[in-house]
Image (cartoon, grey):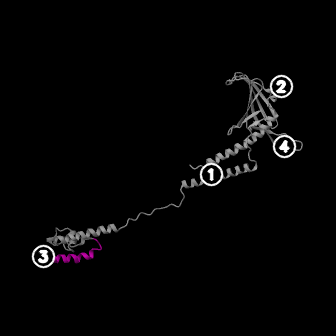
């Protein structure tokens, strides 16, 4: 009994002395326990404020533990997960800016191409290419820089003409009234004459000016590939004047004359416009195609 009374008296004194020191959390200032309680740890001293678990009935202790676990799980489950705030940058990304620039450039290119195509079609639309000129059949060679003309002459001559599109120009001579074109466009063409499949080929290289034909050079070689070291003869201007005139007559007889030069310039002007519009449409379709 004395021991119990002493313990009860010490507990009351400990609680009353603990209250002023709870704010400072300096538990070392607590009074030392009486001799009977010197072995008790400090947490057991605090636990004496409530009923010791060892003194509770077993069923009541289990109920308390159950209520504690239930309330803890309820608190945890009731807390909703709040995702961290997402920081959205208002500064445009480099990819977005690059795409905007690309779209602007492509839009400008398409606008210019459409305007140019419309202008060419409205100002002077190209005509359908002709398929014949006199005795010659004309192969337009769409998409290429040259055309081919063919004909038969006599019993055994095959004549082929391969003409390029405009490949040069020179200043034009002014007329008395000061009118006329500023330049004269130039077309190169080659006349190939073969008398039979096994014979040699006569090649005459010419220039077509707006209203005349000019012979530049002529040579004869085999039907096979011409060797690089073949002697090609002198320049046409180095020949005798009578020989030069005879060669012009030789070509005129076969339809290679000034009328052919006029035809070639008209044909190539139309082909140049046709190929130009076709080229612009090809570029436009490429730019419009999405990657």
Q: Magenta region: which residues?
A: 6-25
Residue for badge 2: 246
| Pointer 2 or 4: first along the chain | 4
Which label was assigned to residue 231? none
**Residue in front for this viewpoint, 87 or 255:** 255
**Rounded to the nearest whole Å, what is the CA distance between mark 3 and mark 4?**
138 Å
| Pointer 1 or 4: first along the chain | 1
Residue for badge 4: 180
Q: Using the image, determine if residue 73 lies above or below residue 149.
A: below
Seen at 58% across and 55% down, the residue is 100
Q: Are marks 3 and 2 in contact (CB under 8 Å)?
A: no
Q: Are marks 2 and 4 in contact (CB under 8 Å)?
A: no
Residue for badge 3: 4
> Which quarter of the picture shows residue 66?
bottom left
Residue for badge 1: 106
Local SS, label 1? helix
Residue 34 placement, left or right of 28: left
């Amino acid at each position: 009994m004395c021991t119990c009374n002493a313990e009860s008296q010490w507990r009351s004194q400990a609680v009353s002395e603990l209250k002023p020191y709870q704010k400072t959390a300096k538990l070392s200032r607590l009074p030392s326990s009486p001799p009977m309680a010197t072995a008790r740890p400090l947490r057991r001293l605090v636990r004496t404020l409530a009923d010791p678990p060892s003194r509770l009935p077993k069923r009541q202790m289990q109920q308390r533990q159950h209520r504690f676990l239930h309330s803890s799980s309820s608190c945890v489950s009731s807390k909703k997960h709040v995702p961290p705030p997402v920081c959205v940058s208002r500064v445009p990304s480099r990819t977005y800016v690059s795409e905007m620039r690309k779209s602007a450039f492509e839009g400008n290119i398409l606008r210019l191409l459409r305007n140019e195509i419309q202008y060419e079609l409205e100002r002077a639309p190209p005509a359908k290419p002709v398929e014949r000129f006199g005795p010659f059949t004309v192969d337009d060679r769409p998409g290429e820089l040259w055309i081919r003309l063919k004909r038969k002459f006599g019993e055994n001559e095959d004549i082929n003409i391969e003409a390029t599109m405009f490949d040069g120009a020179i200043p034009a001579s002014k007329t008395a009234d000061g009118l006329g074109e500023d330049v004269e466009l130039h077309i190169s063409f080659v006349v190939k004459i073969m008398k039979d499949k096994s014979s040699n080929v006569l090649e005459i290289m010419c220039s077509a000016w707006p209203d005349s034909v000019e012979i530049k050079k002529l040579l004869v070689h085999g039907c096979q590939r011409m060797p690089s070291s073949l002697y090609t003869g002198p320049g046409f201007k180095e020949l005798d004047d009578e020989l030069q005139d005879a060669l012009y007559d030789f070509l005129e007889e076969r339809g290679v004359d000034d009328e052919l030069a006029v035809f070639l310039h008209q044909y190539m002007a139309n082909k140049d416009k046709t190929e130009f519009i076709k080229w612009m449409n090809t570029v436009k379709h490429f730019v419009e195609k999405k990657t």
